[in-house]
Amino acid sequence: MQFIEGEKETGCIFCTRLDRRNDREDLILHRAEFCAVFLNKYPYSHGHLMVVPKQHTDSLADLSPECSA
């Protein structure tokens, strides 16, 4: 309920966190050249991870070959 009822931030939550350098607070487990691994603050199940491309696009189909491999 905290997520649903809480205040929402503007912009891309992933881009914002990748621009900052507080990985522990932002739940970033690993940074690679083309992607980063995040813990989900509100996971669907235990151990849920998100692999996020660093290239910001509106569609997965628009990712560069490096980011989508």
Image (cartoon, rainbow, N blue to C red):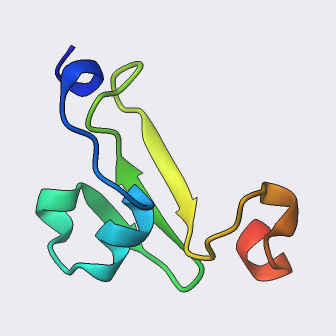
Q: Quadrant of the C terminus?
A: bottom right
Is 65 rendered above or below residue 59?
below
Q: Is residue 32 visible?
A: yes
Q: Quadrant of the N terminus?
A: top left
Q: Nearer the viewer, residue 49 or 18?
A: 18
Q: Is residue 65 left or right of residue 23?
A: right
Q: Quadrant of residue 29?
A: bottom left
Q: Nearer the viewer, residue 56 or 9?
A: 9
Q: Quadrant of residue 54?
A: bottom right
All told, the count of numbered labels is 0
Is 28 rendered above or below residue 67?
above
Q: Is residue 22 left or right of residue 37?
A: left
Q: Is residue 60 left or right of residue 9?
A: right
Is 22 rendered above or below residue 33?
above
Residue at x 34% of width, y 39% of height? 40
Q: Is residue 53 left or right of residue 29?
A: right
Residue 44 drawn at (x, y percent): 41, 20
Q: Is residue 69 visible?
A: no
Residue at x 77% of width, y 67% of height? 68
Residue 60 drawn at (x, y percent): 78, 57
Tell which residue pokes out farthest to the top in this image: 1
Residue 20 drawn at (x, y percent): 23, 78
Q: Quadrant of residue 5?
A: top left
Residue 3 drawn at (x, y percent): 25, 26
Is 32 rendered above or below residue 63?
below
Residue at x 30% of width, y 68% of height? 17
